[in-house]
Image (spheres, helix red, strand yellow):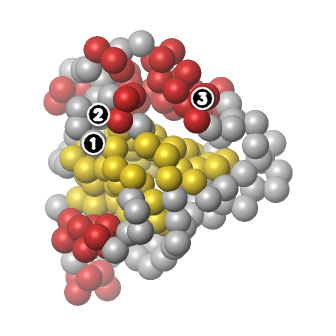
Amino acid sequence: MYNNISFTSTIRPVTVPQYKQEVLAFEKPCVAKFPWTINEAVIGENVVTTNVMDCSVCGIKVKDKVFLLHTTPFHELNKDFAKIEAIIKENVDLKTDDIQAILIGGKPPYTHGPESYQHFEKYEAFLQKHNIPYSKLKGGMGIRHVAYSNKKDEWLIAHDKIARPQERLRTTPIQELKNIFSEISISEKDNVSWYA
């Protein structure tokens, strides 16, 4: 089903200060900004978004570009998921073999009500329907920041609870992700590492 895919991105947990420093070095980053609707979706070689709480972030990489959506389930523009699907289809060649995604979000219903999980699950159903391999980082608490660097072919996932570099001998990057997300599934086309 996924023949000839060369996508092998690294998912790298980083501290918030590391994230800020590394994103500053990005060449011409495209930023998905507030109010986090389908209108703020971006496409580029380097993409960035911050303050992911009850929202869902879906990054779909085709060849050397990423289409990044950061959408809140509570904004009127995002309530009709068919519009989000249409935006994705306008910007991404879903038929190519060289496609991979990452999906982040889905706050537990007891924190924000069921909308966050339901919104996340619509993205997941879309990726599955189109046979797009993806890594899933779902649930958990706190604020996350997400960025993709084409130069390093890596996703940065920042959170206040990520171990500082001097503490990393006592933990693993996958354990750090497990500390901030309640459900993790890493695509066979991705890896998790402290290093790009």
Residue sitting at x 52%, y 26%: 87
Q: Specify few, some or many for label 2: CA neighbours under 10 Å numbering under 14, 14-19, or 20 or more.
A: many
Q: Specify few, some or many for label 1: CA neighbours under 10 Å numbering under 14, 14-19, or 20 or more.
A: some
From the viewer's perspective, is 68 left or right of 6? left
Q: Is residue 91 visible?
A: yes
From the viewer's perspective, is 159 left or right of 77? left
Three-letter amino acid code at the position of disc 1? Lys
Residue sitting at x 82%, y 56%: 4
User: Could you say which disc has been placed on residue 33 in the image?
Assistant: 1
Residue 100 point in image, percent of width and height: 62, 49
Mark closest to the chain's N terminus, 3 or 1: 1
Q: Is residue 49 above or below residue 11?
A: above
As measured in the structure, the alpha-carbon distance from the residue carrying label 1 to the one carrying label 2 is 6 Å
Q: Secondary structure at mark 2?
A: loop
Three-letter amino acid code at the position of disc 3? Glu
Mark closest to the chain's N terminus, 2 or 3: 2
User: Could you say which disc has been placed on residue 90 in the image?
Assistant: 3
Residue 188 or residue 144, whichever sits in front: 144
Residue sitting at x 75%, y 36%: 95
Report which residue position mark 2 lands on. Answer: 36
As measured in the structure, the alpha-carbon distance from the residue carrying label 3 to the one carrying label 1 is 20 Å
